């Protein structure tokens, strides 16, 4: 194995068209088994690049002709041939020259066959003995190549067989060049002298012809006329100054050929037609990265629907008044889609008002879930959407919904790191790097969106006379159901990139390959990677979220723990992570770790948040309907109950009227009576007056001393020394004062 892939000094190796500068072999420790091949490949930007391959990879590269080994390329005979005849490729040859060389090579090979097999003597007389047979084969060859038939006829224009002397000359040149076709190519002399001055003049002329690459789109004739005027001015100046070398004027056709030959075609198209036209004309399409099995490469991208929709649910729209419906403005929703490159199957999607991380995470989470219930919800019974596989590599653009930098802390990037391990952020503004997902969006536009009411088209010109503002009638629910139906249609439609197999068939075939990995991450791993955060409180029945109770041993003991050991202090909320596609459990953030807490209602396992909300709405609607149907029964029972209570109270002479108005007024007055800072609620035991019977004036009139006591009583008022006395002693002194007054 190792000897077969060994490259010697006289051999030449090229990898993807770049020369291999060094070829090293690494053997396994303690054996002669080849472990790795290390290739140093020439790189125009960095000088050299080290590439490592396993033996089986080298074999695959050679079979696919990505790695070419030319044995004996640097040998002395091969070097002499290249000096005499050039390479075996007919570089710079015209179509007419190539056809001539092909005819000569055919005759030379037949001459070699007659010489080696039939013993033809290499003389004119020897060639003449085989001339008739050679002529017959030559005419049949021309008829087959030029007219597609082995039976030549008189109406076909063919070349006659050359003379015997010419045939011998062809054979000798063929033999000396080792079958190099370049030996028969007539090489014309260079039109441009390599003299420094003439080279300078040529550069000057090409600089003037560069004006053809302009956004004003001048014709070649206009550019050449301006260039000739400038050349004549320069030649006149050179003549006046006695400069001997003048710029040679050539024909207009020559200058036209120079524009086509020497100007950068990409620059010409970009300057004259724009960047998009240049990319479309000179862009390459090699199918992108290879993906031999489902999940090998999954592309994510966001696309804005060309459909005007109502930004409400179907139920909300039905409950709105005509005025509310009229004031509602139409909008265009976005969708984040995940497509498997190998099978072209759609693995996940999320419709949103604008691209965001939550929608991207929802699409990523859906890749690991059986989506067949979505088909059943919209009435599709014959198709299945159980396309689930472990993702090995994800590709996105640099949009904010996917994280601008790989592994830069964004939620989507972090989720891909946890679940796939590899995330590729392609260059923004180059949709060709995400050709599969971009082609799917184009298919959506051509085969689905344009047939929906409210179609806006990609531009007003393509819309024709359609009025999306008047046609728009789809709600958010209608848009999602329509998109799911289109996905089912797409999976059952033959795809050109799959050799006209349907994506569903391609998935069924490719999932049997040994590389396919059906082992998807567990519920906790998916929840921790793709879930969203929420804050909740811990109550006696555990954690309640979306109307469901979640609890385990840790949560049950949380309220009885010391405060310093709790997840959250009293009055604080705990942070949880919820999987929108599985409410069977939640993850609670505890001391830097996520702890799984199951739902007490095990019917929630595998149930999505959207499905649960839908069930709750149905349950509430059913409850309201049931209450309406039983309203007569409820009212009858209620009336009978009140009549029974009233009869029992009357017969027992016990009132049930509650407090009297006087009792209420008294309680209201006593609530704040005597609570003011300057109010004195009583002056003595014998002078107490009911606040409801006139009461006591709590504030003195203006100009009157508000103290009812004598001046002598001020002697016993608190002094500055009382601040150092206890409250008990101060209170005792105050009581003594009241005893003296008595």
Image: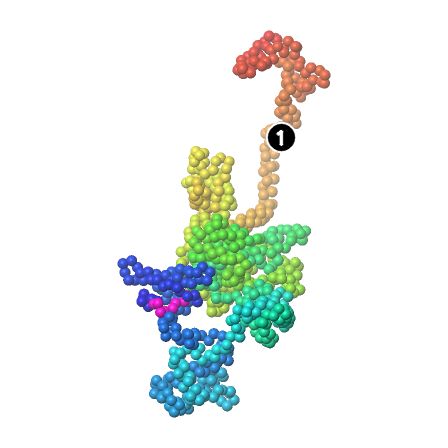
Q: Position of residue 513 (x, y in %)?
A: 39, 63
Specify the quadrant that holds the C terminus: top right
Please name the residue shown 51% across and 59% down the image.
Answer: 375
Front-lying residue, 255 or 567 = 255
Q: Is residue 719 magenta?
A: no
Q: Position of residue 425 (x, y in %)?
A: 49, 56
Q: Position of residue 588 (x, y in %)?
A: 45, 43
Q: How is the image coloured?
A: rainbow
In the image as oriented, which residue stretches furthest toward the left? Answer: 30
Task: Provide residue 277's location: percent of width, then percent of height.
Answer: 58, 66
**Can residue 180 be seen in this snapshot?**
yes
Q: Is residue 312 rendered to the left or right of residue 368?
A: right
Rendered view: 249 above or below 681 = below
Compared across the picture, whether 468 is left or right of 604 comes to: right
Viewer-side residue, 204 vs 470: 204
Q: Residue at x 65, y 17 (%)?
A: 689
Picture quadrant of residue 263: bottom right
**Residue 14 painted magenta:** yes
First to last magenta residue range:
8-15
Query: Foreground residue, 390 or 242?
Result: 242
Disc 1 is placed on an element classified as loop
Determine the residue positioned at 34% across, 84% down: 116
**Which of these two is toward me, 426 or 278?**
278
Image quadrant holding the N terminus, namely bottom left
Disc 1 residue crowd, few under 14, some 14–19, many 20+, Cα 10 Å: few
Q: Which residue is mark 1?
A: 657
Count of marks placed on residues: 1
Tell me if I can see residue 597 in this picture: no
């Amino acid at each position: 194995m190792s000897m077969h892939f060994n490259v010697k000094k006289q051999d030449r190796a090229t990898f993807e068209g770049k020369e291999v500068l060094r070829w090293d072999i690494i053997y396994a420790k303690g054996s002669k088994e080849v472990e790795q091949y290390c290739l140093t490949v020439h790189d125009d930007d960095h000088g050299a690049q080290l590439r490592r391959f396993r033996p089986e990879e080298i074999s695959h590269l050679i079979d696919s002709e990505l790695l070419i080994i030319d044995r004996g390329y640097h040998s002395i005979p091969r070097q002499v041939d290249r000096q005499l005849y050039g390479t075996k490729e007919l570089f710079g040859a015209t179509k007419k020259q190539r056809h001539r060389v092909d005819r000569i090579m055919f005759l030379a090979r037949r001459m070699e066959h007659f010489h080696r097999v039939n013993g033809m003597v290499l003389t004119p007389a020897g060639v003449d003995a085989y001339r008739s047979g050679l002529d017959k084969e030559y005419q049949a060859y021309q008829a087959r190549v030029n007219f597609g038939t082995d039976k030549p006829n008189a109406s076909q224009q063919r070349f006659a067989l050359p003379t015997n002397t010419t045939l011998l000359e062809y054979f000798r040149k063929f033999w000396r060049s080792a079958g190099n076709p370049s030996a028969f190519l007539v090489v014309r002399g260079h039109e441009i002298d390599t003299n420094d001055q003439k080279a300078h003049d040529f550069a000057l002329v090409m600089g003037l012809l560069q004006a053809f690459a302009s956004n004003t789109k001048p014709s070649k004739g206009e550019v050449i006329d301006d260039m000739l005027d400038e050349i004549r001015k320069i030649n006149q100046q050179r003549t006046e100054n006695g400069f001997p070398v003048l710029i040679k004027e050539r024909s207009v056709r020559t200058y036209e050929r120079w524009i086509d030959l020497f100007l950068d075609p990409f620059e010409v198209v970009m300057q004259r037609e724009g960047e998009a036209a240049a990319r479309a004309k000179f862009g390459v399409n090699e199918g992108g990265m290879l993906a031999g099995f489902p999940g090998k490469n999954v592309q994510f991208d966001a696309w804005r629907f060309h459909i005007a929709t109502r930004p409400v649910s179907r139920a909300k729209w039905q409950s709105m008044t005509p005025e509310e419906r009229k004031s509602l403005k139409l909008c265009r929703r976005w969708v984040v889609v995940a497509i498997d490159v190998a099978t072209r199957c759609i693995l996940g999607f999320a419709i949103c008002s604008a691209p965001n991380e939550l929608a991207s995470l929802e699409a990523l989470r859906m890749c690991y879930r059986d989506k067949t219930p979505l088909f059943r919800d919209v009435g599709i019974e014959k198709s299945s959407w159980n396309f689930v596989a472990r993702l090995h590599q994800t590709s996105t653009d640099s949009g904010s919904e996917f994280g601008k930098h790989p592994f830069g802390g964004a939620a989507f990037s972090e989720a891909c790191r946890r679940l796939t391990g590899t995330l590729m952020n392609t260059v923004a503004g180059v949709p060709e790097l995400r050709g599969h997902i971009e082609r799917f969006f184009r298919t959506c536009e051509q085969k689905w969106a344009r047939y929906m009411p409210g179609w806006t088209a990609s531009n007003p010109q393509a819309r024709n006379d359609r009025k999306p503002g008047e046609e728009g009638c789809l709600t958010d629910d209608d848009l999602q159901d329509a998109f799911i139906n289109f996905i089912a249609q797409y999976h059952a439609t033959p795809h050109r990139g799959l050799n006209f197999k349907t994506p569903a068939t391609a998935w069924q075939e490719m999932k049997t390959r040994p590389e396919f990995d059906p082992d998807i991450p567990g519920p906790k791993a998916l929840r921790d990677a793709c879930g969203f955060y929420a804050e909740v409180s811990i109550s006696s029945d555990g954690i309640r979220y979306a109307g469901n109770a979640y609890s385990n041993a840790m949560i049950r003991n949380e309220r009885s723990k010391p405060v310093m050991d709790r997840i959250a202090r009293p009055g604080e909320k705990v942070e949880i992570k919820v999987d929108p596609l599985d409410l069977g459990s939640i993850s609670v953030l505890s001391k830097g770790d996520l702890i799984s807490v199951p739902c007490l209602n095990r019917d929630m396992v595998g149930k999505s948040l959207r499905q649960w909300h839908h069930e709750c709405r149905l349950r509430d609607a059913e409850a309201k309907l049931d209450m309406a149907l039983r309203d007569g029964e409820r009212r009858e029972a209620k009336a009978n109950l009140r009549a029974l209570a009233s009869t029992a109270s009357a017969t027992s002479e016990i009132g049930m009227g509650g407090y009297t108005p006087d009792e209420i007024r008294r309680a209201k007055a006593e609530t704040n009576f005597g609570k003011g800072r300057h109010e004195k609620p009583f002056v003595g035991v014998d002078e107490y007056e009911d606040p409801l019977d006139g009461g006591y004036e709590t504030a003195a009139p203006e100009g009157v001393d508000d103290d009812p006591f004598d001046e002598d009583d001020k002697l016993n008022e608190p002094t500055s020394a009382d601040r150092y006395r206890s409250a008990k002693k101060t209170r005792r002194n105050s009581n003594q004062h009241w005893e003296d007054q008595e």
